[in-house]
Amino acid sequence: MYVFQSFNQYGYEVTHKYTFINEKNIEQTNYEYTHSIQKISDWLDKKNFKYKWYPFEISVDIPKRSEFYPVRAWTQLMPDGKRLIRDQIDRIQQQYLLEIIIN
């Protein structure tokens, strides 16, 4: 099984709450969660799953856009040539692919 999303590498479970005016001019509140790599790893260890984390480094440029959907993230080129993934709530996304081996 594979899981691809943003994870926190510093041991924190983070809840992001943000409110915006959507395309229908209605105020909308959303919640997003960033789980800790350590917490997920601890849970997988307790369940005796084998797993591996793969950091994701994007190799293409995604322009910043003003539309709400479908793209709400863009890349920012750093001096070392790597790209950060940023989003409209001013997060830098640390994305990983988690491979879980299910026997």
Image: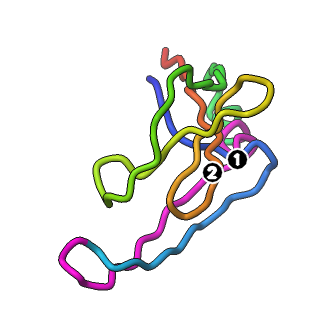
- Amino acid at the residue labelled 2: His
Could you tell me which residue is drawn at 49 percent across and 62 percent down?
32
Q: Position of residue 87 (x, y in %)?
A: 53, 53
Check disc 1 and report the residue beneath it.
8
Residue 35 - label: 2
Q: Nearer the viewer, residue 45 or 96?
A: 96
Name, please, the residue furthest toward the left.
24
Instruction: Say if mark 1 contacts mark 2, CB within 8 Å.
Output: yes
Q: Quadrant of residue 94?
A: top right
Q: Which residue type does callout 1 highlight? A: Asn
Chain part drawn in magenta: 23-42
Residue name at image x 41 percent, y 52 percent:
72
Q: Position of residue 93 (x, y in %)?
A: 61, 45
Residue 38 within the magenta-colored segment of the rendering: yes
Percent of width and height locating residue 76: 62, 39
Label 2: few (<14), some (14–19) or many (≥20) C-alpha neighbours in 10 Å: some
